[in-house]
Amino acid sequence: MRRPPGLSARMKLALSYAGFLAVAGALLLSVVWVYLLRYVPNTSRGLLGISPNRYLLVHTFAPAAAVAMAFLLVFGLVGGWLLAGRMLAPLTSITAAARRAGNGSLSHRIGMEGRRDEFRELSDAFDTMLERLESHVAEQRRFAANASHELRTPLAISQTLLDVAREDPTRNRDEVLARLRVVNTRAIGLTEALLLLSRSDRGTFGREDVDLSLVAEDAAETLLHLAERRGIKLDVTGGTARTRGSAELLLRMVTNLVQNAIVHNLPVGGTVTVHTEARGDASVVRVENTGQPLPPELVPTLVEPFRRGAERARTDEHAGVGLGLAIVHSVVRAHDGTLDLVARPAGGLLVTVRLPGLP
Ligand SMILES: Nc1ncnc2c1ncn2[C@@H]1O[C@H](COP(=O)(O)OP(=O)(O)OP(=O)(O)O)[C@@H](O)[C@H]1O
Ligand SMILES: [Mg+2]
């Protein structure tokens, strides 16, 4: 933004110093003047009723006072200019860093040295902001690269299937069509997950009163079939837990958690427990499942988009893309809640979502 040029802060500070010094000097000289008058009484009448003594006094005092005032003014201006220059020097490096950041270079840091003062605090706050911006931008780039890669995979598989079908007309057409359909369904699922993620990240959705226990029932009902097919015992326990938010997104959140708990479970004899409760002024959903032991250091990374666990080789219809927990995290954030993942010592995961409750 272009603005009309004005006095620099340095000049303003120098003028203020000089102004203060001049006012203080004038006050001091007036006090001296009043004292002098007391010792030179106005006795004999002279020109205009002023005694010759006093004429003499004015003659000697006035030039000395004028020289003193001139000296104070010059001293104030020069001293103020130098002092203000020293004081404002850190601003130059902060401005330079802000310009660089404005031009897109986020890797630069001010790294101001010295003791803590207002400028040091401003510079540290600025550096922290740059750091967060830089990591956010890097995260977005990684996300875009991963999303493109994931979207290309089904397209490439479709192309291979089509090529094979064209070169070998004796192949069973129905089989090719069925495989194309599976690949296409996965691509649609991925695109829908990406759209959902961006919608909940933007936070532009209607809010209504939602009871999480009903949401949990709903999600469990939808996934009961999947759980039965995998021989997993699915339980929903607890009571009312009300919150304000998007019923659709919250259902998606719980569905993703329960689906994970079923899909990433033991091959036989696994259990899943979904528990809802109002605790204090929070509404809590807890999803707990048995499964393989998870390395605790891996657990916090699972919410990153496109992050999949070790058991990648699944090829059934639930071979995930790794967006399930990223969507859960985004929905939780959009509802001002917190998401906690803990590896259970006996294997499997305990996921706790805390959302602001309603009385
Ligand atoms: N309840 C759970 N128990 C054990 N591991 C889990 C659980 N939930 C998630 N994980 C691990 O975290 C990884 C990421 O989960 P996420 O839901 O984001 O992706 P996904 O399930 O692989 O794919 P999808 O996008 O279809 O959900 C999973 O691949 C799995 O390894
Ligand atoms: Mg998942």
Image: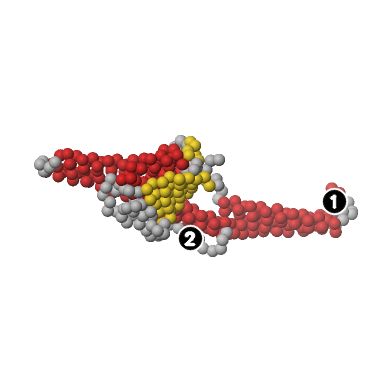
Question: Is the C-beta separation of discs 1 and 2 under 8 Å?
Answer: no
Seen from the viewer's position, the closer of residues 244 and 133 is 244
Q: Is residue 159 left or right of residue 208?
A: left
Seen from the viewer's position, the closer of residues 273 and 170 is 273
Q: Quadrant of the C terminus?
A: top right
Please tell me whether mark 2 sits on a helix, a strand or a loop.
Answer: loop
Please tell me whether mark 1 sits on a helix, a strand or a loop.
Answer: loop
Q: Earlier in the sequence, mark 1 or mark 2?
A: 1
Q: Which mark is residue 294?
A: none
Estimate the x, y position of residue 164 in percent, counting from the top left. 14, 44
Seen from the viewer's position, the closer of residues 52 and 325 is 325
Can see residue 78?
A: no
Q: Residue at x 82, y 57 (%)?
A: 35
Mark 1 crowd level (few <14, some 14–19, many ≥20, 10 Å Cα): few
Seen from the viewer's position, the closer of residues 292 and 115 is 292
Estimate the x, y position of residue 308 in percent, counting from the top left. 33, 53
**Residue for badge 2:** 111
Foreground label between 1 and 2 = 2
Estimate the x, y position of residue 132 in percent, counting from the top left. 45, 53
Q: What amino acid is at disc 1? A: Ile
Q: What amino acid is at disc 2? A: Gly
Figure coloring: secondary structure
Q: Is residue 265 left or right of residue 131?
A: left
Asked whether mark 2 and ligand 1 are closer than 8 Å, the reply comes as no
In this view, 112 is above or below 220: below
Q: CA distance from mark 1 to mark 2?
A: 68 Å
Q: Is residue 326 left or right of residue 127?
A: left
**Residue for badge 1:** 50
Q: Residue at x 33, y 45 (%)?
A: 228
Estimate the x, y position of residue 9 in percent, counting from the top left. 57, 51
